[in-house]
Amino acid sequence: MHKIAIDQLIRSKRKTISLTITKDAELVVRVPLRMPLKDINRIIEEKTDWIISKREQVLKRKREFDALKFIEGGKFFFQGKTYTLVPKNEISQIYFSNEKLYYPSCHDEKLPDILKKWCKAEAKKILPERLKQLSQMLNIPITGCSITSARTRWGSCSAKNRISLTWRLIMANPDAIDYVIIHELCHVIHKNHSKEFWKKVKQIMPNYLIHKKWLKDHGYILDLFE
């Protein structure tokens, strides 16, 4: 049996035990004040498979995130595809070719700003147009669209049915982008996450859970830029 080490044990005035895997793949265990250590270890043992699985998921995401570096030869996401960053002297515009993203040669410290500016520009062209297409196709009218710099959410819908999308969404794959837009369009009809809301999402996008999971697994995209 694989022995699981507890990285942090927190005792407090609570009635239940909670297991959390942090973004650094550490196991944090929260327990009631007087819970015996033997009971804690027994629960850890029962949850061994879950802990190992969650740690593997977190480490995989961490490896993907660590690979996304704003340097020559680093990796970068755009619309769900991974590109290798390659500088080029004789160009003034970013372009793709054979899984490579070519950018105007510059010092490494300037590259994040170049990519950020470019992603924002692409997002302002692509995201509102896709929102408009889906809004018309689904016959769900909206009052407007805003492209924001949000880092805690992919999108939102206001009480007046104005939809906001973070420009960072442009790095997600097209199906995940569609899911976010459909999610927010459904909020035009249902202003909460009720059963009726999710029923509407599923009616429009039967496999939405796949794309919802993709966004959860790639949530680190929201933190790529300052």
Image (spheres, grey):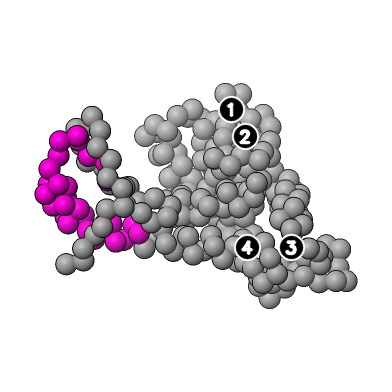
- The magenta span reads 29-55
Does 192 sit above or below residue 3?
Answer: above
What amino acid does circle 2 point to? Ile
Per the image, the residue denoted by label 3 is 108
Gap in Å between the C-alphas at discs 1 and 3? 39 Å
Does 144 sit above or below residue 108?
Answer: above
User: Given this view, does label 2 or label 3 mark the residue nearer the observer?
Assistant: 3
- The answer to which of marks 2 and 1 sits earlier in the sequence is 1
Residue 132 sits in which quadrant? top right
Disc 3 crowd rating (10 Å Cα; few below 14, some 14-19, many 20+) is few
Kind of element beneath mark 3: helix
* Residue ID at (23%, 29%): 13
Mark 2 touching mark 1, by CB under 8 A? yes
Per the image, the residue denoted by label 1 is 158
Per the image, the residue denoted by label 2 is 163
Disc 2 crowd rating (10 Å Cα; few below 14, some 14-19, many 20+) is many
Gap in Å between the C-alphas at discs 3 and 4? 10 Å
- The answer to which of marks 2 and 3 sits earlier in the sequence is 3
Q: Is residue 96 left or right of residue 54?
A: right
Per the image, the residue denoted by label 4 is 69
What amino acid does circle 3 point to? Asp
Disc 4 crowd rating (10 Å Cα; few below 14, some 14-19, many 20+) is some
Mark 1 touching mark 4, by CB under 8 A? no
Q: Is residue 134 left or right of residue 97?
A: left
Q: Residue extending furthest bottom?
A: 98
- The answer to which of marks 1 and 3 sits earlier in the sequence is 3
The location of residue 190, given as percent across then percent down, is: 47, 29
The location of residue 174, given as percent across then percent down, is: 59, 56
Does 4 sit above or below residue 38?
Answer: below
Residue 194's label in the rendered image is none
In the rendered image, residue 206 lying in the magenta stretch gets the answer: no
